Each structure stands twice: as C-alpha cells, then as structure tokens.
Image (spheres, rainbow, N blue to C red):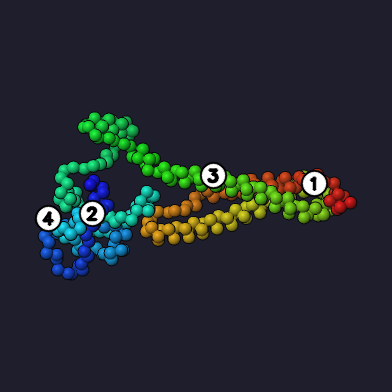
Amino acid sequence: MSIRTALLLILVALRATNAQAPTSPIAPRSAAPGGTRSIAIDSRLAADAKLRVGDRVVVSSEPGVAGDTVVIAGIVQRSADPAEVARAEYRIRLHLDHLQGLLGYGDRVDRFAVRTRDARSAREAISRIDAAAYGFRAHRSADVAVETSKTFAVVSRFHRAIGVITIVASAIFLLCIMLLKVDERRRDVAALRLIGCSARTIVGSVVLEAAAIAVLGSLAGVAVGGAASWIVNQHYQAVYRTPLRFSIVTGDIVLLAVALSLVLGLAAGWLAARRLVRTPPLALFGR
C-alpha cells in the first residue's frame, strides 16, 4: 500500500463522537507529547459523517483492529481536479510519522514528488533519480498529466467535431432563412428599383439589416449560453460535490460566437440580396 493510497483509503474504521464525549479507551499509538494527534478531513467526508472541527474519531488501517483516537483539526475543500470527479473515496490528512506508525509501513514510499526550478534542473533530477537504484522511474508531471487526460482529450475532440458540424448546418439554415425572407420582399425591392434606387443601395440595406439581426441574435445566444452554463455547473457541482466548473463561457468563446454570427449573417444577407437585385423589376412583379 502506498502513502497516497493510504491517504485515500485510510479511513476504514471511523467512529465519530461528540467533542465533549469521553475519550476512547484505546490509547493513541502515535500521540504527540502535548496530547491527541490531529488530522484534517475533506468536506465530502465531513458532510456525509456529520463531522465538525473538534470532533474525536478513531482511525485504523483495517476494520476491527485497534486504531488511534484523533481530533479533527480542519476540514479541507477538494481541489478542482477533473481526474477525481467520479471518485467516491474519502480523504484524510495525517502527519507523515503518524501515518507510518498507523500502517506499520516504515521508512518507505512508493512515489514522491520533486519540484525543480527549470527544465534543465528537471532533466538532471530525472536522470539522477533513474540512476539511483534499480526499479526507480521518474516522470515529468506534464507527462503524467497528458497520460491521465487522454479521456478528456478525446471528449474535447468530439466536442470540436460537433461544433464544426453545428456551425456548417447553422450557416446553411441561415442562408435558407435569409433567401426566404428577402424573397418575400420582392415587390418592395421591385418598387425601389423602379423609382431609381440602385442595386448597391438595396444590397447594402439588406446586408445592414442582416448584420443587426446577427448581432442581436449573438447577444441572445450568449445570454442563453451563460444561463445554461450556470445551471449545468450548479447541478453537477452538487452531484459530485466538487468546485470544478463543468461548463465555462469565456471571452474567447463569446468573441468567436459573435464573429461567426456576424460573418455568416453578412454572407447570407449579401447572397440573398444579390440574387434578388439581379432579377428584373417587372419580373419581380410577376409580369
């Protein structure tokens, strides 16, 4: 069992008592000179077991064996780590000597982390650790993150493909709508042509109207997207009890959406207007 695994799974036997209740008769095996050892627990465990700071609990390495009576000194909020969203383990934090004594693991670890100042120091540390003893293997944290995030990379590519398909379908749909809307005004366009309005003026007015509609539609879309993102975050943060944000509307996304909407609106308006002004005015009246 590794130190990290122990941190995740050490709370096998847990007995919560009131802060004023008598102390458990089991003597702590790793008690500090000043009294009972202290631990920190995560907020999920605190909520499920209804524990508070100052409560006394008993922790042991296995069920049914004598454990140590400890005091909860703090409640820690979980970090926003996507790799830990679906995990249902509870976490507690102990002092290293306390954990070693509780597990009987001795001065051994299965993995440890070393922080370096720059890339060169990282390379030197990796080579020295790998050469220290047989079986040692060092990895950069970035490489570990890439390996553990492959699932999220696949999901990201899937979302990108859906986005491209949606944009293309939206562009076609928008062009069809603009053609129908402009075609409904064929008599108005014919009258303008007959009184002397140039094709350029008519095309410009249609394009300007399409741009205004595109901007208003973009603002409405941003508002709907922001509201949907808030609802998604509120729901899934409550389900998984994590501060991780599952949906984010960033400034880059807003700018991209507005730019795409404006470009597609202008293109659809221009194509629809050009198709209409090329038709003779009398033909527009049906003669």
Rounded to the nearest angstrom, the CA distance separating label 2 from label 3 is: 43 Å
Rounded to the nearest angstrom, the CA distance separating label 2 from label 1 is: 77 Å
Other-residue count near label 1 (Cα within 10 Å), few / some / many at <14 / 14–19 / ≥20? some
Task: Tell whether label 4 touches label 2 (CB within 8 Å).
Answer: no
Q: Position of residue 38 (x, y in %)?
A: 19, 57
Residue, x 49% and y 43% (percent of image)? 157
* Residue at the spot of label 2: 10
Q: Quadrant of residue 140?
A: top left
Residue, x 73% and y 54% (percent of image)? 181
Which one is earlier in the sequence, the residue at label 1 or at label 4?
4
Residue, x 27% and y 59% (percent of image)? 75
* Residue at the spot of label 4: 29
- Give SS at disc 2: loop
Pick whichever, 238 or 67, lies toward us. 67
- Give SS at disc 4: loop
* Badge number at residue 191: none
* Residue at the spot of label 3: 161
